[in-house]
Each structure stands twice: as C-alpha cells, then as structure tokens.
C-alpha cells in the first residue's frame, strides 16, 4: 500500500504575503521531526507551501500550480461559504455535487494527487503541501461517498490527512489534526 500525506501550509506572516512567519517555520520544523520518510514531496508553487516542506526537513521534488484563477470556482465557493457551516465538509460535498466549476476543480486536484502516487513503488509514501479550500475539495472528490458530516472542521495550519492509495484510487483516509 502507498500513502499520500496532504498538509496545509504553516503559519504565514501577519503582514500578509506568501512567506512563512518564524512561528510557522518553528511549527513546521517541530511537526517534520515526526513525519516521513517520503519518496516524493510536492508542493504548490506558492512560496509558503515550499517553505513549509523545507522547514519540515524535506527537499521538494515537484512544484505544481494548484491555485485556480477560474472566477466561477471562486464565485461558487464564496456563495456557499461552506467553511462556515456546522458541518463544513458536508456543505462542501453539497456544493461539489452540483457539478459546477468547483466540482471540476476539485476533481482536477484529486487527479493530480493520483498522478503523484501512480509511479511510486509499493510501500512508498508521498507528501503534498497545499492550501485551505483546495485540500478539502480534493479530499471530498477522492471520497465522494464518505460520511462528510463526521470529518470535522476545515484544516488549520499544518493539518491534513493521510490517504491510502491502492493501484489507481484512494481507498481510505485518516485525518491528521494538530493538538
């Protein structure tokens, strides 16, 4: 069995921008001590994602463009405000079930994750560092029939999930929450 660990980037600077704050570097460094090993590490092209992987102690093998510029995706997300719902993953699943732009984006992210896993030998693991909203949407796309009402809140910094990959699909998920 192969696994993909997905994580949201660490804390960024309070002044905005794309770089991590020192507290974010410290958090990622501490978390990284208990992670891995990974045969492959991929991140978003946004600096805070790459900086998170490096602070965790992992070299980045691949950077991918994940953030969408599709206004319809942003409009669907903003109109739903799924992250504010009592059961945000269930609310997100409802938005994706409509089959619009956000659905297509979520499934493109899920396909990207499958593409990262497919060439890995049996027993190897991969790490992907991305962004809030993207990770949750792709996770719902990977597990459309799950009980999303039990998945809890959207990911905070450095939270994520571990997905088990069996040949061509993700078959199990375990959430990785910060204490």
Image: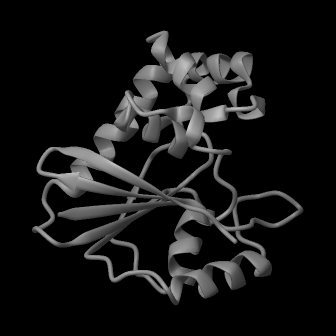
Q: Nearer the viewer, residue 151 or 119?
A: 151
Q: What is the tally of numbered marks visible in this picture? A: 0
Residue 152 point in image, percent of width and height? 64, 45
Image quadrant in which the C terminus is located: bottom right
Toward the viewer: 13 or 160?
Answer: 160
In the rendered structure, the answer to whether residue 36 lies left or right of residue 45 reads left
Residue ID at (26%, 46%)? 171
Taking the spot 81% from the left edge, 67% from the top edge, the residue there is 13
Q: Quadrant of residue 17?
A: bottom right
Q: What is the basis of the colouring in this image?
A: one colour
Give x and y (percent) for residue 127: 39, 67
Q: Is residue 8 visible?
A: no
Choose top left, top right, bottom left or bottom right for residue 25. Answer: bottom right
In which quadrant of the rendered image does the N terminus lie? bottom left
The residue positioned 70% from the left and 18% from the top of the image is 80
* Quarter of the image where one finds residue 103: top left
Q: Position of residue 62 (x, y in %)?
A: 34, 64
Indicate whether 105 appears above or below 65. Answer: above
Which residue is at a point 65% across and 24% down the rendered structure image? Answer: 77
Q: Is residue 93 left or right of residue 62?
A: right
User: Relative to 23, is 133 above or below?
Assistant: above
- What percent of the width, then of the height, locates residue 12? 75, 65
Give the residue at the far right of this rendering.
15
**In this view of the protein, can residue 101 be seen by the observer?**
yes
């Amino acid at each position: 069995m192969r696994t993909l660990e997905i994580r949201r980037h660490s804390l960024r600077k309070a002044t905005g921008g794309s770089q991590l704050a020192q507290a974010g570097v410290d958090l990622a460094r501490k978390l990284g001590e208990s992670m891995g090993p990974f045969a492959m590490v991929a991140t978003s092209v946004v600096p805070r994602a790459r900086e998170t992987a490096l602070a965790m102690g992992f070299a980045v093998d691949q950077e991918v463009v994940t953030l969408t510029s599709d206004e319809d995706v942003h409009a669907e997300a903003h109109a739903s405000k799924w992250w504010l719902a009592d059961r945000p993953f269930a609310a997100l699943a409802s938005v994706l079930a409509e089959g619009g732009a956000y659905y297509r984006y979520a499934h493109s992210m899920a396909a990207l994750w499958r593409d990262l896993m497919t060439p890995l030998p049996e027993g190897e693991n991969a790490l992907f560092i991305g962004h809030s909203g993207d990770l949750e949407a792709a996770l719902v796309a990977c597990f459309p029939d799950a009980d999303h009402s039990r998945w809890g809140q959207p990911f905070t910094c450095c939270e994520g999930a571990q997905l088990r990959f069996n040949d061509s699909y993700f078959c199990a998920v375990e959430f990785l929450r910060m204490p």
